[in-house]
Amino acid sequence: MAEPVNLNRFRKQKARAERKARADENAVKYGRTKAEKSLDSARRDKARRDLDAHRSEDDADT
């Protein structure tokens, strides 16, 4: 005769594995490294500075 199994344990293990798999997929899909984030921020700041440098005095008031 087979040993009795705790179905709650298996249900929770399965749910835990599914959440981990979904988290891994999201990390690949949406995750960015710190270097990528800082590079993006630096590029955005430079674009803002370049745009501000090209403004005329009349445009600064609006």
Image: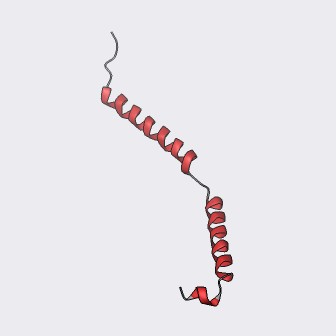
Closer to the camera in the image, 46 or 29: 46
Q: Nearer the viewer, residue 24 or 58?
A: 58
Q: Is residue 55 left or right of residue 26?
A: right
For the rendered model, the colour scheme is: secondary structure
Q: Position of residue 8 (x, y in %)?
A: 31, 30
Residue 21 screen position, x and y as percent: 49, 38
For image coordinates 36% across by 34% down, the residue present is 12
Task: Note whether 28 is above or below 39 in the view shown.
Answer: above
Which residue occupies the extreme front position in the image? Answer: 58
Asked if 5 appears above or below 61 in the picture, the reply is above
Residue 18 as seen in the image, left or right of residue 60? left
Q: Residue at x 39, y 35 (%)?
A: 15
Foreground pick, 27 / 3: 27
Image coordinates of residue 17 in percent, x first then y, are 45, 35
Residue drawn at (53%, 41%) of the image: 25
Image quadrant where residue 32 sits: bottom right
Residue 50 position (above or below residue 14):
below
Count of numbered circles in the view: 0
Q: Position of residue 38 (x, y in %)?
A: 63, 65
Give the camera-side residue of 38 and 18: 38
Q: Residue at x 60, y 89 (%)?
A: 58
Q: Quadrant of the N terminus?
A: top left
Q: Residue furthest top?
A: 1
